[in-house]
Amino acid sequence: MNDRHRNTYRVAIGTQQIELPLVPINPDVAISLLMTIDRGVKFMERAGAELADLVRNDRPDIVATAATLGIPLAVEVTRSLGLDDYIVLQKTPKIHLHDALVEPLSSITTDSEQVLRLDRARIPALAGKRVVLVDDVVATGGSLAACLRLLRAAGANVVAIGVLLVEGTGWRGALGADAAMVQSLGSIPSFTRDGDTWREQWD
């Protein structure tokens, strides 16, 4: 049972169950926060293998994700699919990205506008290839939509989207027809304040 007084939410991610902290994003709304970089190797190994099984029939040539929380997942999905390369769309202006392909994005967990960057040297790994896009959580859909635009600008054929968790349903509008490609290992609500506790909000 979820204990809102302890400010955690118990969720199933595939065959694994974990407690996620409830983190307010404003005085009246909170989210259950999944930090893949804090979950450990064994957790991510199993989650990545289970997500790989969901997208295996789409026959991807390569896995793509956005920095930073998608990276551990991309590594494990790539490994489980028997592939040996993955693409990371960067959010920081590294020196080798001065002429990168760029796409603006916004995220529910970040309080400022960001820019996704794709190293032009990596375009040949994407152009004409079957790509599966993976990420930790889809909430508003804005981050995934930006990733899709950038990958397609590089000539990628995105055949599947795999996420650990979907939050509510609002992301479907942002993704439009691409929402049909989303496969997940679990779902979480957002939370609205109800006195001194949090009430689940699924839409």
Image (cartoon, helix red, strand yellow):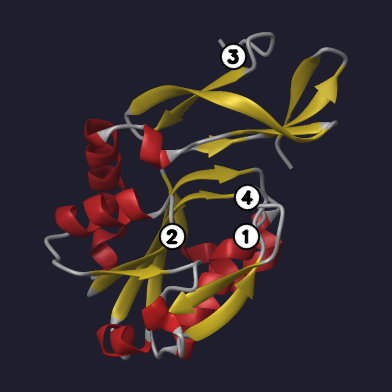
Q: Is residue 161 visible?
A: yes
Of marks 3 and 2, the one in the foreground: 2
Q: Residues within 10 Å of mark 4 (few under 14, many from 20)?
A: many
The amino acid beneath tag 4 is Ala
Q: Which mark is residue 67?
A: 2
Q: Which mark is residue 139?
A: 4
Q: Is residue 157 visible?
A: no
C-alpha separation, residue under disc 2 versus residue under disc 1: 16 Å
User: Does 193 sit above or below residue 139?
Assistant: above
| Direction from residue 47 to residue 161 in the image, left or right | right
C-alpha separation, residue under disc 4 versus residue under disc 2: 16 Å
Label 3 vs 2, first from the N-terminus: 3
Residue 121 at what x, y percent from top left? 30, 88
| Direction from residue 148 to residue 130 in the image, left or right | left
Q: Residues within 10 Å of mark 1 (few under 14, many from 20)?
A: many
Q: Quadrant of the C terminus?
A: top right
Q: SS at mark 2?
A: loop
Label 4 vs 2, first from the N-terminus: 2
The residue that label 1 is drawn on is 141
User: Does 21 sit above or below residue 4?
Assistant: below
Q: Which mark is residue 3?
A: none
Q: SS at mark 1?
A: loop
C-alpha separation, residue under disc 3 versus residue under disc 1: 26 Å
The residue that label 3 is drawn on is 2
**Residue that protrudes farthest toward the right in the picture:** 195
**Callout count:** 4
Label 3 vs 1, first from the N-terminus: 3
Q: SS at mark 3?
A: loop
Question: Do labels 3 and 2 touch, CB within 8 Å?
Answer: no
The amino acid beneath tag 1 is Gly
